[in-house]
């Protein structure tokens, strides 16, 4: 039986950073995952500037940048009659985003956790989260060799996705829920010139393309959730038909080569979970899940891993009561996530824009710097109140002669 300060269940974007940061603080950490690494998983791939800033703080950004994944320094939002181009403001001096394959990113994170001193068990199946007197005490499971393990910890962290075993075991309540709003499918092409992120917003589709590792381009299409049955019944035909709504992209893709099958899902719930309790905590999609239409999942998981690791370090070291530290984690997480979550639900709803939307977009089309700031409000790295205030909007409109 192993004894740890923290056991982390799940070693991808929420789990490995949490384990790494705690191990760097000198805590005894075990991180387990049913997968072996490198391995793939459903993902939008995108790491926004606030996620890349985390990688820089952790000393991992250079490794990701050297993996053959080109930096994304600008975005184009094609609204049909109006096209906006700009770059979201830098975060902590990091101006680039990255659309990095999960086979690459997750391996970097797992290796970093191991290098920091965390014990890493790959191909490990957690069969039970153990409890005693209402408190979580550890995990039971088996390795790839069939050997069974019973490990104990002061805190067990669920970083095991939206369907988290840890969350289900403790009955972690959800709140601010919205139903699944979209379905999404994606694939990869080679030989296609795409230099930055391209977004095509259509009345019932969102189409996104971005350069990823090995000279390839990742292309993802979103539909309203009500169309899942139709799309699932003819995935390739539906995908290609949607691409025709973005002729400039479709033409380039036709000249390239699709390199992998089309993958996707219609299981995209939107919720917050209470992320802590007696002997347990949640991070990443286990504690806060939203539609991937704005591709915030990875970057938010990185941010929340920092918040959780700091709270656990405070509690384990005795600087703060553990319950108070974890309550502070939930408050900080929710405050940081709120704007991006609300924007995600709005975009994923395919709701018609308000009446004053078109004049603003026309004004932004003439101002790339302001467009970049607008993009920052969309992903939640620039406060909406800083952009959508009367003085700033007045300057934009007067500058556009409106």
Image: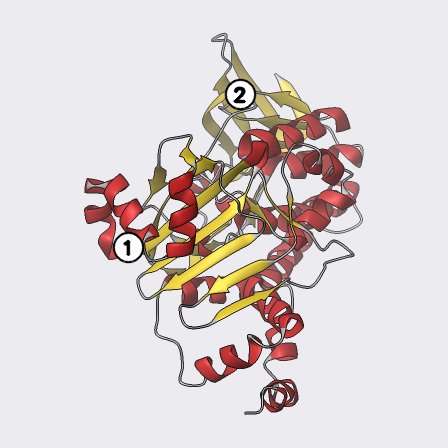
Where 87 sits versus 358, above or below?
above
Q: In which quarter of the image is residue 174?
A: bottom left
Position of 176 compared to 203: left or right?
right
The front one of 216 and 154 is 216
Q: Which residue is drawn at 57% across and 58% down?
A: 75
Question: Which residue is the site of mark 1?
Answer: 225
SS of the residue under disc 2: loop
Residue 322 visible, this orientation:
no
Where 272 sits versus 5, above or below?
below
Tag 1 near tag 2, CB within 8 Å:
no
Quadrant assignment for the C terminus:
bottom right
On the image, the x and y values in percent for residue 156 come to 58, 35
Q: Residue at x 59, y 69 (%)?
A: 377
Residue 373: assigned label: none
Q: Earlier along the polypeptide chain: callout 1 or callout 2?
A: 2
Residue 182 visible, this orientation:
yes
Dot 2 alpha-carbon crowd within 10 angstroms: few under 14, some 14 to 19, many 20 or more = some
Q: Residue at x 48, y 45 (%)?
A: 44
Q: Residue at x 40, y 63 (%)?
A: 201
Position of 46 compared to 242: left or right?
right
On the image, the x and y values in percent for residue 177 come to 39, 60
Q: Tell which tag, 1 or 2, sits nearer the viewer.
A: 1
Instruction: Report the number of discs.
Output: 2
On the image, the x and y values in percent for residue 191 come to 49, 36
On the image, the x and y values in percent for residue 70 come to 64, 41
Residue 36: assigned label: 2
Quadrant assignment for the N terminus:
top right
The front one of 26 and 116 is 116
């Amino acid at each position: 039986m192993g004894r740890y300060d923290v056991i982390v269940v799940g070693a991808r974007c929420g789990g490995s950073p949490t384990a790494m940061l705690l191990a760097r603080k000198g805590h005894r950490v075990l991180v387990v995952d049913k997968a072996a690494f490198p391995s793939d998983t459903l993902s939008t791939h995108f790491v926004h500037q606030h996620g890349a800033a985390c990688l820089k703080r952790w000393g991992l950004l250079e490794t990701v940048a050297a993996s053959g994944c080109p930096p994304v320094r600008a975005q184009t939002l094609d609204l049909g009659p109006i096209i906006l181009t700009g770059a979201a403001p830098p975060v902590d001096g990091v101006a680039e985003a990255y659309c990095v394959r999960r086979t690459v990113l997750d391996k970097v994170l797992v290796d970093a956790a191991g290098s920091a001193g965390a014990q890493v068990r790959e191909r490990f199946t957690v069969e039970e989260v153990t409890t005693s007197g209402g408190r979580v005490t550890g995990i039971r499971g088996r390795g790839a060799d069939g050997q069974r393990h019973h490990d104990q910890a002061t805190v067990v962290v669920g970083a095991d996705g939206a369907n988290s075993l840890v969350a289900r075991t403790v009955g972690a309540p959800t709140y601010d829920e919205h139903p699944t709003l979209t379905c999404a499918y994606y694939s990869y092409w080679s030989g296609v010139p795409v230099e930055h992120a391209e977004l095509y917003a259509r009345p019932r589709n969102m189409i996104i393309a971005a350069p990823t590792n090995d000279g390839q381009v990742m292309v993802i299409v979103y539909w309203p959730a009500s169309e899942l049955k139709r799309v699932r019944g003819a995935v390739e035909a539906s995908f290609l038909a949607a691409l025709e709504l973005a002729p400039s992209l479709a033409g380039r893709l036709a000249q390239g080569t699709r390199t992998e099958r089309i993958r996707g899902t219609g299981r995209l719930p939107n919720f917050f979970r209470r992320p802590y309790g007696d002997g347990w905590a949640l991070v990443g999609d286990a504690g806060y899940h939203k539609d991937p239409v704005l591709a915030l999942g990875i970057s938010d998981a990185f941010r929340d891993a920092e918040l959780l690791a700091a709270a656990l370090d405070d509690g384990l070291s005795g600087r703060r009561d553990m319950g108070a530290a974890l309550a502070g984690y939930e408050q900080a997480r929710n405050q940081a996530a709120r704007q991006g979550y609300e924007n995600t639900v709005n975009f994923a709803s395919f709701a018609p824009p308000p009446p004053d939307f078109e004049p603003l977009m026309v004004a932004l089309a003439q101002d790339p710097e302001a467009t970049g700031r607008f993009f920052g409000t969309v992903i939640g790295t620039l406060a909406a109140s800083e952009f959508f205030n009367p003085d700033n909007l007045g300057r934009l409109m007067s500058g556009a002669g409106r």
